Image (cartoon, rainbow, N blue to C red):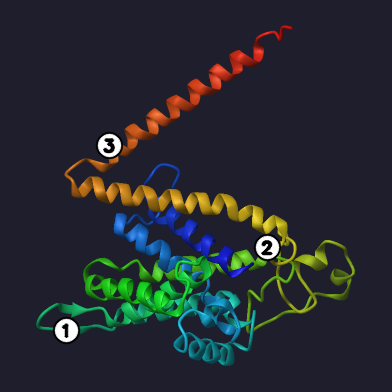
Amino acid sequence: MKGAHHALCGAAAWVAVASTAPLTLGWYPVGPLGVVAGALVCAGAALAPDADHHDATIAHSLPPVSQWVCDAVGAVSGGHRNGTHSVLGVAALVGIAWAAGKVTATTSALGDLAVGAGATSLLLVAFAARALGLGRGRLQAWALAVALAGFVTVVAPTGWDWLPVAVGTGAAVHVLGDMLTGGGVPLLWPWEPRPPRWWTRTPGLRDVWTRGGNFAVPLLGTTGSRRERLVAVPLTAYATYGVVVALAAGTLTSLGYDADAVLARVVEAATTALGTTAAVGAVVLQQPVTG
């Protein structure tokens, strides 16, 4: 998958998992700020497995720091689409996020500061900003990343326990996304079992378990295919929907309204309007054509 599509998958996955708005799963509910900030963090985490490539999009997201990180990750994981694209790689990223969340510093003015969570968010938000075009230049990418990372640093000790969940969700979505392309991923790395000869000679099967030990369900074809671009359209719409609803809920709550009740009425009105439109359209289509 292309970098931007990975980021969109991560943002959409976080909306589905963390938001309690209609059309979401709400498996790990967080507040409106958690949905908005988490969408950016998860989008960045959905790019993190590509930190094994020195020339990936994220390597240029926050130079020179991002380039140093990518060089180090690539050296440890064995190069592109190896260690970071496996179950072990996802687990390692979650572990890093969890450990980073434990790194705090105490100050007299601001109390406890989540230094580790802030530094992690700094990189991840920069990854997302680069891939999604949220910052055109190096200065804008740094400004967005530093602003959100600073917020995380101050607030994380009391309200950001979801950081490892967001990182794990984003990384897992990345691996699943690459599994949908023809190249597949080494899910069981560092063990890369080769299929038997009869398997590699069977059409269809050899695309699911490749000669190199990768596993794939190549529904999207090659990376950057038309099918992949088409999938990105509803993902963009869904992620945007989740962020907009979260912003609306946060605004309504700050104004003293019951955000859930207001949003429920809006959804009910929209559903009624759609039903009425469909009914009218059906009646019109049933009318005989004259002339």
Residue 141: quarter of image: bottom left
The spot of residue 128 in percent (x, y) is 47, 70
Q: Work out how far the residue at label 2 is from the one at label 3, CA to CA, in angstroms.
A: 39 Å
Q: Is residue 58 left or right of residue 223?
A: left
Q: Reading the chain from its start, which is encountered first: label 2 or label 3? A: 2
Q: Which residue is mark 1?
A: 106
Density class for disc 1 (Cα within 10 Å; few <14, some 14-19, many ≥20) is: few
Specify the label residue 261 is tagged with.
3
Disc 1 residue type (three-letter): Thr
- Rendered location of residue 220, percent (x, y): 71, 59
Q: Which residue is pictured at 70% across the width and 65% down the height?
A: 181
Determine whether 254 is above or below 51 in the image: above
Locate residue 262: give its quadrant. Answer: top left
Q: Is residue 186 above or below residue 67?
A: above
Residue shown at 32% from the left, 60% from the top: 34
For this view, does 149 lie left or right of residue 241?
A: left
Q: Which residue is mark 2?
A: 180
Depth check: 233 or 25 in front?
Answer: 233
Q: Secondary structure at mark 2?
A: loop
Q: Nearer the viewer, residue 152 or 291?
A: 291
Give the residue displayed 71% in from the left and 57% down from the top. 226
Q: Residue at 27%, 51% (x, y): give it.
A: 250
Q: Real-space Cα distance between discs 2 and 1?
A: 45 Å
Viewer-proximal residue, 289 or 185? 289
Q: Amino acid type of disc 3?
A: Ala
**Amino acid at circle 2:** Leu
